[in-house]
Amino acid sequence: MAQIYSRIMATGSALPERVLTNADLEKFVDTSDEWIHSRTGIRQRHVAAEGETTGDFATLAAQRALDAAGVKPSELDLIILGTTTPDIIFPSTACLVQHRLGANGCAAFDVNAACSGFVYALGIADKFIRSGQSKKVLVIGAETLTRMVDWTERETCVLFGDGAGAVVLEASDEPGIYATCLHADGGHKELLYNPVGVSVGFKDEPNHGVRIRMSGREVFKVAVKTLDSLVEETLAAAGMEASQLDWLIPHQANLRIIEATAKRLNMPMDQVIVTVDKHANTSSGSVPLALDSAVRSGKVKRGQNLLLEAFGGGFTWASALLRY
Ligand code: ACO
């Protein structure tokens, strides 16, 4: 029997209308455009308006991907949504999006792997397709991370933004996704987490609200080291050399982390998709937003080899090497 691959049919994305620039932030946070840009590459971020939810951006991104693919929601047999900022505790945001699209009946679930959520979801979707279980799968990464940002905490509030991206995958005789690698190490929880939850109680420390805790410098070091070995592992799993890659589409947290990974791969920065300047860190939204912008701008073309990678809270880290 011929091997089944999963292939990206089309991509889509959605961003909140409101843009908050570094200059805007300077007005109410003790920071500067120079500090933010030189350390992270970020110039601006999109911020959800009151009442806008992760599910809103996920639905819009999904509709755009479905339109571009020419696929009706009723043709989907699986929806997987990576998010760490679901609309509500349950039902899952995947179920909310499914209903709004009109795809009721197919399997739908969320994956929480922090910033690696979309790449995790892509890896899982690939397994469903390769096993013959699913033929058309919608994979989404969507976040409203600014909902858990404390705008008085300059160490973190300058880093994050909101948005969503999506891809429609189909079963195909030809690649498609060559390899995916998914990893986690729960031993680093204290370096990057949000302590508010259900079982532990809904309240954070007094006067703090729901906010992200991050030891930036330590996260930075582990991320660079981990991504180095991840890209090697992914190339080996796909049986490919770095020289065969056309594009690196990395998680958009920090330009310096992105540059370190590109250097490891010996790839010039003009083969790296960078959107961190415009979107900041949108966690699960980051890789599919970067992918969609690269596809729609005409940079990424059919037949090219793309390496997608992400690193985030957990820690989690994940990659996918695919022919677009
Ligand atoms: N504006 C101005 N000054 C600031 C700001 C700010 N927004 N934030 C911190 N500073 C100050 C600090 O107080 C410190 O001052 P001090 O030296 O007087 O004590 C100084 O700047 C340097 O701070 P560092 O933390 O050493 O700065 P660093 O160069 O490490 O950059 C950063 C910080 C940008 C957070 C970086 O460490 C980083 O990007 N880390 C990785 C974060 C990341 O990738 N997260 C990804 C996962 S996110 C997820 O999964 C949800």
Image (cartoon, grey):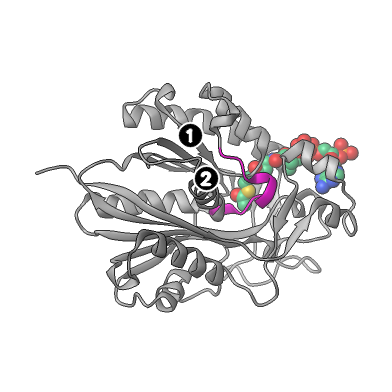
Camera-near label (2 vs 1) is 2
In which quadrant is the C terminus drawn? Answer: top left
> Is 306 displayed left or right of 14 in the figure?
left
Name the quadrant where ligand 1 sits: top right
In which quadrant is the N terminus drawn? Answer: top left
* Residue at the outermost left position: 1
Q: Is residue 192 one of those drawn in magenta?
A: no
- In magenta, the rendered stretch is 273-284
Q: Position of residue 215 (x, y in %)?
A: 71, 44
Q: Residue at x 62, y 30 (%)?
A: 259
Q: Label for residue 208?
A: none
157, 297: nearer the viewer: 297
> Is 151 displayed left or right of 267 in the figure?
right
Specify few, some or many for label 2: CA neighbours under 10 Å numbering under 14, 14-19, or 20 or more: many
Q: Residue at x 37, y 65 (%)?
A: 79
Q: Label for residue 294?
A: 2
Is residue 271 positioned above or below 114 on the image? Answer: above
* Residue that numbered label 1 is attached to: 247
Is residue 272 positioned above or below 170 on the image? Answer: above
> Is 27 displayed left or right of 192 in the figure?
right
Q: Position of residue 266 (x, y in %)?
A: 53, 21
> Is 305 displayed left or right of 216 in the figure?
left
**Regarding mark 1 in the picture, which secondary structure is present there?**
strand
Q: Residue at x 66, y 77 (%)?
A: 51
